[in-house]
Image (cartoon, rainbow, N blue to C red):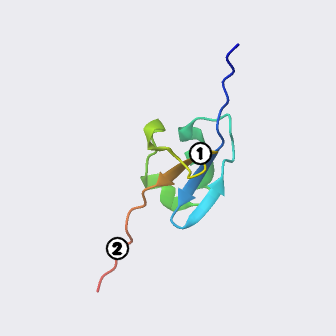
Amino acid sequence: MISIQTLPRKFKIGATIVEDPAPEASLDEVQRILTAQYPMLRHTRLYQNDGRLNQEGTEIVYEFQLIPVKTKG
């Protein structure tokens, strides 16, 4: 008998690692949830193949690619 185990997800926002707020939700739904606390995520997009296993192989980490802050200088 084969059993399938789903690895937990974590999300990297800059230097911050955030636990998955809704493990059963899609990546789009999780992004909408996290946008309430991290508004800069509104301008990014995650795809299923963006996930990387951590060094121990115990969880999948998705890193949001943030748009650099623009300054006049």
Q: Secondary structure at mark 2?
A: loop
Q: Which mark is residue 70?
A: 2
Say which of 54 and 72 sits in front.
54
Residue 6 locus on image (x, y percent): 65, 32
Say which of 60 and 63 sits in front.
60
Residue 19 locus on image (x, y percent): 67, 53
Look at the image and tell me whether residue 3 can be seen. Answer: yes
Say which of 14 and 33 sits in front.
14
Q: Residue at x 59, y 65 (%)?
A: 16
Residue 2 locus on image (x, y percent): 67, 17
Q: Earlier in the sequence, mark 1 or mark 2?
A: 1
Q: Secondary structure at mark 1?
A: loop
The 10 Å Cα crowd at callout 2, few under 14, some 14 to 19, many 20 or more, is few
Q: Residue at x 61, y 52 (%)?
A: 34
**In this picture, residue 13 sits left or right of residue 73:** right
Cα–Cα gap, marks 1 and 2: 36 Å
Inspect the image, locate mark 2, and give the three-letter code of the amino acid beneath it: Lys
